[in-house]
């Protein structure tokens, strides 16, 4: 039985869409998860043929894989669409002789410290300094220009959870101390804060050929954390000069990592006409990304990524090109969710492709401190990006989260 093994998934979003795609492609799907609640919620994962709990140590994962082969399962691929398991899955796939991606490059992309090392001296990343475990915080801070804003982050941060905007000695000190306590053995990155519009670029690299699948302009809500609340999938960058410089920047970055086969996404800021890499991750973005790319282009990117991992030729020909905007739903106060109203009304609004509500009754909700505190999204289309955005925002007005206040 031809089998694809997935290491980790979320209940929704790109990682779950990948499992659904594998099931539709005719593969037996096995999920190794470190989420015990998924075992209890087994009936909600109808597209997964077998779910196994694991603590994700290499020894334990190898045991589960061996167990599957002893059952007669023919493992065709071992993959992950979740940070920080993409590289781990690729290593295990390599051990089983079913790896068709650039293992070492994916590992470097997963770590922001390694990313800076790979791109050092190329002028493609923000100016950064590194705080090493055991260093004097005060001596380190004295090396910084305290008139500027700085981003303090863990090299393995995901979803804005450990990315902190700071200004002044006290804020920088508090951020470093907080992350050092949480990650005592990790280097802490301190990067200059750059002003400028931010873009996300989804890429598939097949045999050294770079395929730019989508360019998405992001709307960022800046508070205690950086929360992306809007994604505009652009049919094309209007300025040809910007497109040329973007293509050149992407080529330099991919070449530096020596990535010949795999998927990744780049977050770039346009700073005074020049592109600067804010982050790179060796996978498609999570959340609604696969759905919005499919709505805009007709490409199911997780399915094509699976083909790449299986050693098949991905089909990245765009079947359509239309503006798409995704608006994420957040709240501005804390409370326990009583109910959500308006989903059907929002779904019936003009040009709405999808309405997704994440939380269930009884969950505790809060204003966003990470991407995980976004509680739903609306995907809409339009004749222009501006119209698509307005359609999504109009539909969002129908949604209401009813909370029992603290």
Image (tube, rainbow, N blue to C red):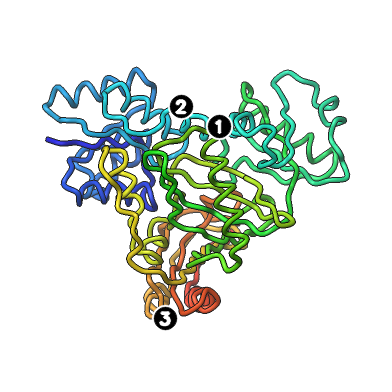
Local secondary structure at mark 2: helix
Quadrant where the image shows the N terminus: top left
Q: Is residue 403 visible?
A: no
Q: Which residue is mark 3?
A: 349
Q: CA distance from mark 1 to mark 2?
A: 12 Å
Q: Residues within 10 Å of mark 1 (few under 14, many from 20)?
A: some
Residue displayed at 22% across by 21% down: 66
- Name the foreground residue: 138 vs 91: 91
Local secondary structure at mark 1: loop
Q: Which residue is mark 2?
A: 104
Residue 41 position by quadrant: top left
- Name the foreground residue: 32 vs 96: 96
Q: CA distance from mark 3 to mark 1?
A: 41 Å
Q: Is residue 96 visible?
A: yes
For residue 111, the mark is 1
Tell me the mark number nearer the camera, choosing from 2 and 3: 2
For residue 369, the mark is none
Quadrant where the image shows the C terminus: bottom right
* 34 displayed left or right of 115: left
* 157 displayed left or right of 62: right
- Name the foreground residue: 104 vs 236: 236
State which tag comes first along the sequence, 1 or 2. Answer: 2
Position of 327 relative to 179 (above/below): below
State which tag comes first along the sequence, 2 or 3. Answer: 2
State which tag comes first along the sequence, 3 or 1. Answer: 1
Tell me the mark number nearer the camera, choosing from 1 and 2: 2
Q: CA distance from mark 2 to mark 3?
A: 46 Å
The answer to whether the residue labelled 3 contacts the one labelled 1, judged by CB atoms less than 8 Å apart, is no
């Amino acid at each position: 039985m031809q089998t694809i093994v997935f290491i980790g998934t979320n209940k929704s979003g790109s990682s779950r869409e990948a499992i659904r795609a594998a099931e539709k492609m005719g593969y037996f799907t096995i999920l190794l998860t470190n989420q015990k609640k998924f075992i209890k919620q087994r009936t909600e994962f109808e597209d997964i043929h077998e779910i196994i709990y694991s603590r994700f140590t290499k020894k334990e994962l190898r045991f589960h894989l061996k167990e599957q082969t002893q059952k007669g399962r023919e493992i065709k691929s071992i993959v992950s669409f979740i940070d920080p398991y993409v590289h781990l899955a690729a290593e295990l796939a390599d051990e089983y002789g079913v790896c068709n991606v650039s293992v070492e490059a994916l590992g470097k992309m997963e770590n922001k410290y390694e990313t800076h090392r790979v791109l050092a001296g190329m002028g493609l990343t923000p100016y950064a300094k590194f705080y090493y475990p055991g260093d004097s915080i005060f001596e380190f801070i004295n090396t910084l220009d305290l008139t500027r804003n700085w981003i303090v982050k863990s090299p393995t941060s995901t979803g804005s959870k450990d990315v902190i905007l700071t200004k002044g000695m006290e804020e920088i000190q508090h951020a470093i101390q907080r992350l050092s306590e949480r990650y005592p053995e990790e280097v802490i990155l301190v990067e200059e804060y750059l002003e400028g519009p931010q873009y996300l670029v989804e890429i598939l690299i097949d045999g050294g050929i770079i395929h730019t699948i989508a360019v998405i302009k992001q709307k960022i809500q800046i508070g205690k954390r950086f929360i992306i609340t809007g994604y505009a999938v652009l049919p094309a960058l209007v300025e040809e000069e910007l497109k040329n410089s973007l293509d050149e920047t992407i080529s330099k970055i991919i070449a530096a990592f020596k990535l010949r086969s795999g998927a990744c996404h780049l977050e770039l800021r346009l700073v005074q006409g020049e592109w600067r890499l804010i982050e790179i991750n060796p996978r498609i973005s999570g959340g609604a990304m696969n759905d919005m790319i499919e709505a805009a282009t007709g490409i199911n990117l997780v399915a094509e990524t699976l083909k790449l991992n299986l050693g098949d030729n991905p089909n990245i020909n765009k079947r359509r090109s239309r503006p798409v905007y995704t608006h994420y739903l957040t709240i501005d106060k804390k409370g326990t969710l009583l109910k959500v109203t308006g989903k059907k009304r929002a779904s019936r609004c003009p040009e709405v492709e999808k309405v997704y509500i994440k939380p269930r009754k009884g969950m505790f909700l809060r204003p966003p401190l990470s991407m995980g505190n976004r509680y739903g999204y609306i995907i809409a289309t339009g004749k222009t990006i501006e119209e698509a955005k307005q359609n999504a925002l109009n539909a969002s007005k129908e949604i209401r989260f009813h909370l029992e206040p603290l």
